[in-house]
Image: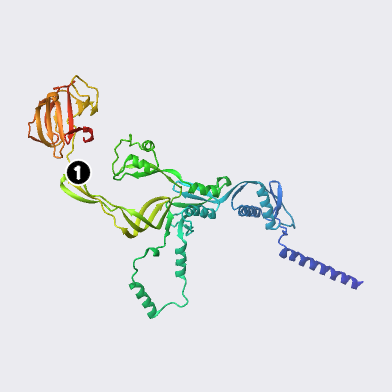
Amino acid sequence: MKKISRYNKKMRYIYIKCAVVASVLAILFFPTWTKFEKAGDNMFEVWLDETQVGVVAEREDADVFLARARKQLVKKENGIVFAECDMELKGQEVLFGKIDEEKDVVSKMAEVLAKNERQTLKQSFTVKINEYTVNVASTDEVLQLLQASINKYDSENKYHVSLMQDTTRELNVLTANVESLEEKKQEEKKEETPLFPEAGVYATLSEMFESVEPAGEKDFEDFELGLIDMEFGDEVEIVEAYLREDELTPLSEAIEQVTKDKEKNKIYEVVAGDTLGGIAYSNDLTIEKLIAMNDTIEDEFSTIRVGDELIVTVPEPELSIERKEENYYEEDYEAEVVYVDNDEWYTNQTKVLQEPSAGHRKVVAIVSYRNNAEVERELIKEEIVLEAVPKIVERGTKIPPTYIKPISGGRLSSRFGRRSAPTKGASTYHKGVDWATPIGTAVMASSTGTVARAGWGSGYGYVVYINHADGKQTRYAHLSKVLVSSGQKVSQGDKIALSGNTGVSSGPHVHFEILVNGKQVDPFEYLN
C-alpha cells in the first residue's frame, strides 16, 4: 500500500512538472496565444464595414495592418486609390486567446477596401510642349508619342528619342532629346578597350600621321546624302502625375494631336522687295485675310516698310521638328547682277549694259528645315557645268530731288485725269491737281530749281514754271501775285507766289502740275 502511495505521489509530481514545462513552451513558441495579464482588454476583433477581418493583440496593430492593406491595394492598381471604410475594434480580456497572422488580416482588409474603392488615380505622365499639354499612361507611351513626331521625317530610322532628368529644375521633371543611333554606336565603340592598344613609338607615329595627313576635297560620291541632324524645335517637358482614367488621352489620339498640322499665328518681318500681295501668297493667305489679321493694315494699298512685323498663319504641328539634310542636285542658276555706278545720274536712273544668261551647276547643299518649310540652304560643294553670264546695269548714285505739296492746308477740289468741266472754257481732262484755298495763301516751290517762266499765262492766269535738276518741271497757276522772276534760283519751300483766282478759274485755288519729259503726270505719284 505504501508502495502504491509513493508511486501515486511520484506520478502526480511528474504530471505537474510536465504541465508547467508545457505552459512555458506554449508561451515561448506559440506567440499567437496571448498570455493573461490583468490590464484590461488584451485581444481585439477587427471589423471593417461590419465584416470581421481578424483578431489582433494590440489596437495599434489594426492601424498598421490597415495601412499595409491600402499599400497592397495601391501596388496592385499602380496608382493612388481612394477607398473609404469604417474600422471597429471589439476588445476582450482573456487568459489565453488565438490572434491571426498579419498577412491574413491584411489580405482580408484589402478585400474589403477593394469593394469600397471610390476612385483610383493612376500613375501617368503629362507632356508639355510650349502651352500645349497631353496626359499619357506611361513613359513608354511618352517615348512612342515623341518618336512619332520625328518618324514623319526619318524614314530610315536613324534617330530615336531618349528621356533624361532636367538638372536645372528643382521638381522631378524629365526632358526629351533626339539622338543619332550611328553616333551613339561610334561613342560606344570608342569606349571599348582594344585587346592590344597602341603604345610607345607606335602610338606616337599614329598621332603624327593623323595630324599631318590632309583631309582633301570631297568628290560628289564621297558625301553621305540624306538626314544628318535632327532635334525638337519646341521645348518638351515631362512631369509625373496621378490622374483619373478619364483624364488620360489614348496614345493614338495623342499622336494625332501632336503631329497633325494646325494653323498657327506667326510673326513675319518685312524685307526689301516685299508687297502685301506677295506676303499673302507666300503664306497661303488671301490679301483680305492678311488685312483682317493686322490692325496696322487699312487696305491693299497700305504702305509697308522693311522691318515691319505682320501676323501671318502657317501650318505647324504642336511639336515642331528641326532637321538638316545633305542633298545633291543639279540646277540652272543666275549670276549676281553687276552694277556700274554713274555719279552723274540719279539713283532712279538705270541702263542695262549686258543681258544675263543662265548657267548650270552641280551642287551638294545642307538644307535646314522646320517641319516641311525650308529655312536655310548652305552650299558645301559646287561644280560649274556652264558659267552664267551676269546682268550688267549702269545706275546713278545721286539722290533725286523730292517734291512737296506747294501750299499748307487747302481742300483737294480736283484730281488729275478725266473730269466734268467745272466752268466754261475749262478742260475735261485735268492736267494737274487743284486745292481750294483763300486768295493770298503762300505758294511754295515744290522742289529746288530754276524759274523758267513767271507772269501771265492766258488760261492759267498768273503762273510760275520751275525747272528741276532731274529734268522735271513744276507749274503753279491761277495766282494772284508772282514773287519770283525768270532765271531765279529757288530752294524747296521758298515762297514764290500768292494764290488767287485768275485765268479760267471756278474759284480761289492753286493749280499744280508736274511734267516729265514735257508731259503732265499725276503729281500724287511724286509728292512726299
40 with respect to 455 (left or right): right
Q: Which image quarter: residue 440?
A: top left
Quadrant where the C terminus lies?
top left
Q: Position of residue 299 (x, y in %)?
A: 33, 34
- 417 lies above or below 284: above
Classed neighbour count for the residue bearing mark 1: other residues with Cα under 10 Å, few (<14), some (14–19), many (≥20)? some
Q: Position of residue 342 (x, y in %)?
A: 16, 48
Mark 1 falls on what kind of element?
loop
- 413 lies above or below 282: above
Give the number of callouts: 1
Q: Between residue 91 and residue 226, name the one nearer to us.
A: 226
Is residue 310 at all visible to an observer of this figure?
A: no
- 291 lies above or below 145: above
The residue under label 1 is 349
Q: Position of residue 391 (x, y in %)?
A: 25, 51
Q: Between residue 439 and residue 44, name the one nearer to us.
A: 439
Q: Amino acid at mark 1?
A: Gln
Q: Between residue 450 and residue 78, name the one nearer to us.
A: 450
Q: Position of residue 353 (x, y in %)?
A: 21, 49
